Amino acid sequence: MAFHTKINQFLKIMTQSITKTQDPLTSRDRRIIATIVNQSHYPYECQPSDVITIWVNSDDVVWVKMTHGYARFNKELYDFKIHLEKIMFINQYVCQKPDSFEMRKLSALQTF
C-alpha cells in the first residue's frame, strides 16, 4: 500500500511539473524557412507565420509543414540554402548597423 501511495505522489508531482513546450523555431528561423520555400517550386507564397514545423526523415529529406501544405527538400541542398540565407542576413545587418568606431568618428567630427 505504501508503494502505491509513493507512486501516486510521484506521478502527481511529475504531472504538475510538465509545462507547455516552447516553440523551437524563432522568428528568424521562420523567415529563413519561408524565404527558402518561396525560392523553390512550392505552389503557394509562404509567409514566416505560415511555417508550423520542420523535420528531417531518415532518408535525408527535409519536410516543412506550413498552414497550406508540406514542402520537401533534399537535406544537402536545404542545408546549403540555409547557409546562404544566413550569410545574406548577416551582410544586411552589417550594412545597416555602422561600426561603433565609425559612429565615434562621425560624432567627433560633428562636435567641431
Image: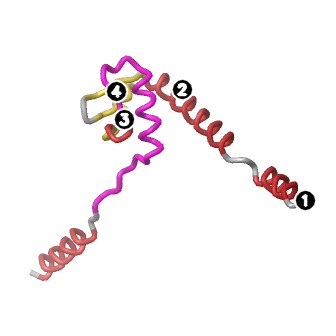
Q: CA distance from mark 3 to mark 1?
A: 48 Å
Q: N-terminal of the two: label 3 or label 1?
A: 3
Residue 9 in the figure: left or right of residue 63: left
Q: CA distance from mark 3 to mark 4?
A: 7 Å
55 drawn magenta: no
Direction bottom: furthest residue:
2
The magenta region covers 20-46
Q: Residue at x 65, y 43 (%)?
A: 96
Residue type at mark 1? Phe
Q: Position of residue 102 (x, y in %)?
A: 80, 50
Q: Provide the residue designation for mark 4.
A: 45
Name the element at disc 2: helix
Q: Provide the residue designation for mark 1.
A: 112
Q: N-terminal of the two: label 2 or label 3?
A: 3
Nearest to the eye among marks 2 and 4: give it: 4
Nearest to the eye among marks 2 and 3: give it: 3
Q: N-terminal of the two: label 2 or label 4?
A: 4
Q: N-terminal of the two: label 2 or label 1?
A: 2
Crowd tier of the residue under label 1, counting other residues whose Cα lies within 10 Å: few below 14, some 14–19, many 20 or above: few
Q: Position of residue 9 (x, y in %)?
A: 18, 78
24 drawn magenta: yes
Direction top: furthest residue:
41
Do the numbered discs 3 and 4 sit on residues whose CB atoms are within 8 Å? Answer: yes
Q: CA distance from mark 2 to mark 4?
A: 21 Å
- The image's colour scheme reads secondary structure
Q: Provide the residue designation for mark 2.
A: 80
Q: Position of residue 46 (x, y in %)?
A: 35, 31
Name the element at disc 4: loop
Which quarter shows the N terminus? bottom left
The numbered disc on residue 47 is: 3
Q: Position of residue 106 (x, y in %)?
A: 82, 52
